[in-house]
Amino acid sequence: MIIQPKTRGFICTTAHPEGCAKQVTRQIDYAKGKPSIEGPKNVLVIGASTGYGLASRIVSSFAAGANTIGVYFDKAAEGSRTASAGWYNSAAFEEAAAAAGLKSYSIVGDAFSDEIKAKTIDLIRTELGKVDLVVYSVASPRRTHPKTGETFASVIKPLGATYTNKTVNFHSGEVTQATIEPATEDELRQTIAVMGGEDWQMWIDELRGAGVLAEGATTVSYSYIGPEITHAVYREGTIGAAKNDLEATARRLNDQLGANGGRAYVSVNKALVTQSSSAIPVVPLYISALYKVMKEQGIHEGCIEQMYRLFSERLYVSGETPVDEKGLIRIDDWEMRPDIQAEVAKRWADLTTENVFELSDLEGYRREFFQLFGFETDGVDYEADVDPEVSILNQR
């Protein structure tokens, strides 16, 4: 079939297998072209099929030479429906890992469930023995609690007061005002249950209890802080409350693992185009302005560049891992440079529909959004007939 992008708001409902494979290959080539990392040997990535999770898996394999298990919830093609982008990404990754002689396995299912945790533990025990790095990078709008059966849904809302600021329709370029009503107490509770640290804690507890977490193991999860522009809807909103819970979990895990030389961190990463970030009002416009400024300064990074820097300059350096006063790893350091933020704030004040393409990199944002799904990728013939049904090697 000929696969074209079909969008519904901030969601793309189709994905292109060849385009996704090209994007994965580009990241692999980047990792292979950098100095090798003396780091982990056996890595579990929970949430491994897109974004920072996928990039973490690529860096682990192709820069550090590690064996990996990826856990993710993606769907295969069915009838006229394409597979999800994460499915195609993972198929390309598994093929490249096999060609490189690396052990690599995929478990497709609900990472929140007891079933998938048990299945993963059995696979670790059988194929790897133990894992020495656990990356927790799950991004989901919903979670069913494995013990109570309650299903939680997250919301992106401010706390305490109505919030209004600029936002953009990144398809049309129209800059408007977005107004978001504050979250209720129950919406806050549910968002923390989905996006906080409880499931990360459950994973580490299960891995330790089963004896498949290596002595001295490291675990890391990902967060974002961002500038004042986005704080009301992000860091000081429901998502920020969930991230506070995630960071408290990291401190607790660090204490628990530290007795055997282990470590737990939250890495605060740079703002990037993701399926999740595109859904947050205000954020796409901020990212577009940020991209323009950072590209002009020659310091723009994507997922793979961020994760290589995380592994090579923070997690696996001689001596102690550099952290801020709260114990957080800051790979958003270039984004948050005072000169970068001052320029972004200056442009933000002036942004309108008429000048958005001049003052920001909205076109770059829009292109990266479609590249998440394998579209607008150089070297792909989008008029060619392609088979949407792609199998994943070593799927368990």
Image (cartoon, rainbow, N blue to C red):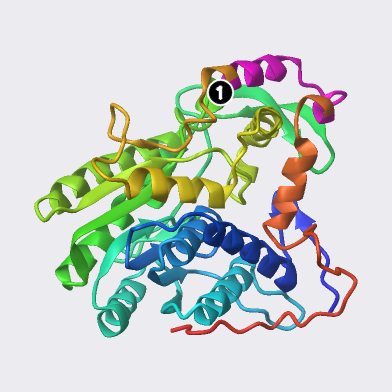
Q: Position of residue 207 (x, y in %)?
A: 23, 67
Residue occupied by mark 1: 162
Front-lying residue, 293 or 388: 293
| Direction from residue 142 to residue 208 in the image, left or right | left
> Residue 154, relative to residue 342: is it above or below?
below
In the image, the segment drawn in magenta is 340-357
Q: Which quadrant would residue 245 be assigned to in this image?
A: top left
> Residue 24, relative to residue 394: is it above or below?
above
Q: Which quadrant would residue 319 be assigned to in this image?
A: top left
Name the amino acid type tagged 1: Thr
Front-lying residue, 53 or 244: 53
| Direction from residue 308 to residue 230 in the image, left or right | right
Front-lying residue, 268 or 163: 268
Is residue 232 among what the camera can see?
no
The residue carrying pointer 1 sits among few (fewer than 14), some (14 to 19) or many (20 or more) residues within 10 Å by Cα, namely some
Location of the C terminus (image quadrant): bottom left
Q: Position of residue 260 (x, y in %)?
A: 11, 56
User: Which residue corresponds to the image point at 81% horizontal and 27% vertical from the top-left?
Assistant: 356
